[in-house]
Amino acid sequence: MDSIRHIFRIGHGPSSSHTMGPMRAAEMFLKKNPSAARFEVTLYGSLAATGKGHMTDAAILGVLSPVTKTDIIWKPKEFLAFHPNGMLFEAFDANGNKQDSWTIYSIGGGTLANETYNEKTDTEVYPMHNIRDIQAWCEKSGYSYWEYVEQCEGSGIWDYLAEVWEVMQEAVRRGLEAEGILPGGLGIRRKASDYMIRARGYGSSIKSRGLVYAYALAVSEENACGGKIVTAPTCGSCGVMPAVLYHLKETREFRDSRILRALATAGLFGNVVKTNASISGAEVGCQGEVGVACAMAAAAASQLFGGTPAQIEYAAEMGLEHHLGLTCDPVCGLVQIPCIERNAFAAARALDANTFSNFSDGRHRVSFDQVVEVMRQTGNDLPSLYKETAEGGLAIKYDAHQ
């Protein structure tokens, strides 16, 4: 299992698999072919189906077109076997001869892979790959999940997580200040600042919930505008973790050092899902994005409130279990409807999962690892039209002109 740095990637939205991944792939291909006279990039399957709404072409052209002429070819009906988010990069010389080609896939969270190369398993940082074994180690040794992260990653992980936390907070603050219409043509106004103002007019419990909504909306709206955010575990679900952690820091005055430990715990749970299933909406639907984000945030909250390893695992299990089967059906291929609202509801659900687990002794029947396997199988069983192709569900029922 690789570093949690791959769960928490700092970059620009709106999509980790459709924007970050293709941009990184273009940079890698350009580095191999700096003298090419022309580039041709073919996008397949889900990547092509919703690529324009996710600014996939803009991400690739932003890297390659300043160097030389670049053509984008869209093949939304053609799915390559390895993963729904396939890309073929081709480089040509001045005489039109092909000098290099590379097929690569954006498999979620900005991670790249193909049949011979996989960033997900490129470096083995964690010797244990499931929560059952890690939890048993914690209970036997007396250490917590975040201490396991530190032992495997080294002390340098804290500097990285400090940067992650700062970017998350900045995204919340920017999003709360910004107003106006989100790009893409749906005419959706930003809501975060309005929700914050309205929340402050209520009493304790409703105010608290309203502020959580506002923080999640703030980051998700920043993502929709291509702003700087952190994948947690993806761009489409990037509002959940910051909302929960920002809210708990503001209301409970947790120190940043404790927030970073909570981030480490969350990253570990997200990493287990990424290793054993998927965090790609194109592969398993939104359960792999917002569902995993909810599980991560629930684990982080439980960590902050002093949960035992069993209680933390239970909180994460509930966060993921109650998103099983969630489809990915973005309207117009944009990370807006229903994505933004889902971030707000998942943040609230993460806090509920933490509360529920901390009322318990942590013992329960269905384990986190079992839910991860169920999520993987459910994702395999979902028809492709419900997995980020914008060909089913809300994507075809919603009428922007009504």
Image (cartoon, grey):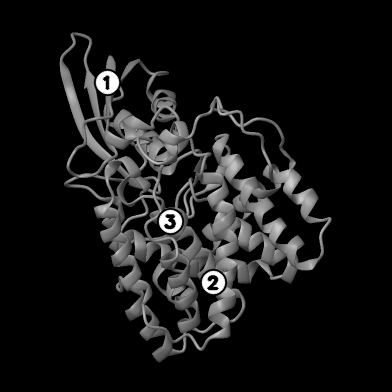
Where is 393 relative to 43, above or below? below
Where is 112 relative to 347, above or below? above
Residue 357 x, y percent position in the rendering: 53, 79
Residue 239 x, y percent position in the rendering: 57, 51
Q: In the rendered structure, find residue 353 and report the number of the disc placed on it.
A: 2
Mark 3 against mark 2, which lies toward the viewer? 2
> Which image quadrant is residue 241 in?
bottom right
Mark 1 against mark 2, which lies toward the viewer? 2
Residue 231 x, y percent position in the rendering: 48, 50
> Which image quadrant is residue 35 in?
top left
Residue at 58% from the left image edge and 59% from the top image edge: 347
Q: Is residue 228 left or right of residue 116?
A: right
Q: Marks 3 and 2, Cα distance to the nearest angstrom?
A: 21 Å
Q: Amino acid at mark 1?
A: Glu
Q: Marks 1 and 2, Cα distance to the nearest angstrom?
A: 47 Å
Residue at 55% from the left image edge and 37% from the top image edge: 224
Q: Is residue 280 left or right of residue 103?
A: right
- Location of mark 3 (residue): 7
Q: What kind of element bears circle 2?
A: helix
Residue at 34% from the left image edge and 59% from the top image edge: 274
- Location of mark 1 (residue): 40
